[in-house]
Amino acid sequence: MPMSPYLTSLRERIGHDLLLLPAVSAVIRDENGRILLARSQDDEQWALIGGGLEPGEEPASAIAREIREELGVEADIGRIIGAYGGEGMLITYPNGDRCAYVTVAYECRLAPGAFALEAEELREAAWFTAAEIAALDTQPYVARILADADAIPAAGE
């Protein structure tokens, strides 16, 4: 999905300068407890499904929208795992845009059936066990959220 009109208007005014943005992330599990991770078109690292909130949008509605847009399926939105910010949420995009995200992470389950990736944004998605995730190159925030969701061991365990 291309940049939202709201974000586009901000970028027109401030260029590539750092923006603090609200976001949502989904910890999506399958019936075997595996976690769904994806890679975007412009990044080699694996990440959770998610994205930014639009003005006036509730976080739970935003994560349902992001899952629908990125995977083409509906999802059951569960409990809030936590809220995250800090160094692990600072991102510089290939075009030079800098963002500091504060994300609310939710437990989610996909509706039955296959999902279809939004090709403009995602190049691949796959289900992984905790052991497989430990061997992946993931975005810095992923391990922290998955540990809080009891999906992988916390650092040092």
Image: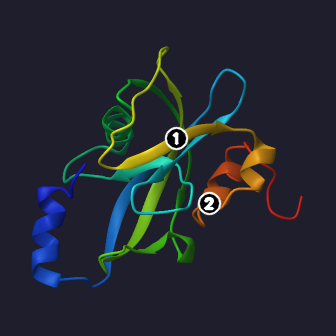
Report the residue that reaches farthest toward the top: 112
The crowding category of the residue bearing disc 1, from other C-alpha atoms within 10 Å (few below 14, some 14 to 19, many at least 20), is some
The answer to whether 89 is drawn above or below residue 98 in the figure is above
> Label 2 belongs to which residue?
138
Give residue 148's position: percent from left, percent from top.
69, 50
Of pointers 1 and 2, the one earlier in the residue sequence: 1
Find out whether the residues at labels 1 and 2 contact each other: C-beta distance under 8 Å. Answer: no
Can you say whether 130 is above or below 139 in the image? above
Q: Which mark is residue 69?
A: none
Instruction: Characterize the local packing of mark 2: few (<14), some (14-19) or many (20 or more) Cα atoms within 10 angstroms.
Output: some
Q: Nearer the viewer, mark 1 or mark 2?
A: 1
Cα distance, mark 1 to mark 2?
13 Å
The amino acid type found where label 2 is placed reads Thr
Front residue of this view, candidates 1 and 99: 1
Instruction: Say left or right for 41 vs 1.
Output: right
Residue type, numbered disc 1: Ala
Question: In this figure, what is the number of numbered marks?
Answer: 2
| Secondary structure state at the residue bearing disc 1 | strand
Is 151 positioned to the left or the right of 9 in the image?
right
Residue at image mark 1: 125
Residue at 43% of width from left, 64% of height from top? 102
| Residue 124 picture location, percent across and down | 49, 44
Q: Secondary structure at mark 2?
A: loop
